[in-house]
Image (cartoon, grey):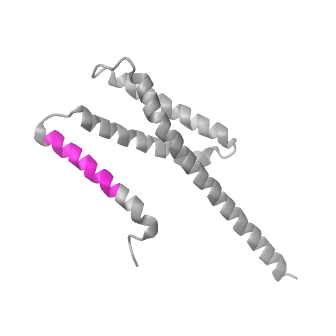
Amino acid sequence: MKIIDKKSFLPTVCVIYTLLSVGKIVLEAQTQGKFGSDQMNMLTILLFSFLGTLVLSQHYRLAQLPLLLVAVLQYVVLIAAVLLFTWISGFFSPLHPKAYVDMFRSFTVPYVIAALVYYGSLYLEVQKANQLLRQIKEDSKNDHK
């Protein structure tokens, strides 16, 4: 039995890369005695990736609502978190005059792409499951004849 196969290869690479990147950030912060903006940016990307994935993964809890409404609600929650994070970070370091616009754009573009890929994959999975169910029903009818 293989632990890493075709299906788990890319997720395994991503997890290893993430662990190495975070480890490098922590090690640099300790050895250099400073925590720079590059390290903060990388951890911010990790945080937003985590939040985006978490919120997208909860779509099934809102299955009774139309998909477009769910996607909009998810986006509103996430962009509010991003803008709140930006506002809070302003207490610790000065913000660029266009910080909110930049954060909005920097989060929205990758999120929309990721959400489209996620929901597109989900749609294809549902179509495949529906096709399988139709096939099972058809086979069941033919067996009872």
Please give left or right for residue 59 compared with residue 140 in the image. Answer: left
Picture layout, residue 78 above or below residue 119: above
Can I make out residue 105 in this image?
yes
Q: Residue furthest top?
A: 97
Residue at (43% x, 33% y) in the render? 106
Residue 29 figure quarter: top left
Residue 104, magenta (yes or no): no
Please give left or right for residue 37 compared with residue 83 in the image. Answer: left
Residue 29, magenta (yes or no): yes
The image shows residue 36 at horizontal and vertical percentages of 21, 33
The image shows residue 63 at horizontal and vertical percentages of 66, 46
Viewer-closest of 52 and 97: 97
Please give left or right for residue 69 compared with residue 74 in the image. Answer: right
Magenta segment: 15-30
Can I make out residue 84 in this image?
no
Q: How many marks?
A: 0
Q: Main secondary structure of the magenta part?
A: helix
- The quarter of the picture where the C terminus appears is bottom right
Picture layout, residue 142 above or below residue 101: below
Please give left or right for residue 16 compared with residue 138 in the image. Answer: left
The image shows residue 84 at horizontal and vertical percentages of 43, 26
- The quarter of the picture where the N terminus appears is bottom left
Residue at (17% x, 46% y) in the render? 27
Q: Residue furthest right?
A: 145
The image shows residue 76 at horizontal and vertical percentages of 55, 31
Residue at (53% x, 48% y) in the render? 57
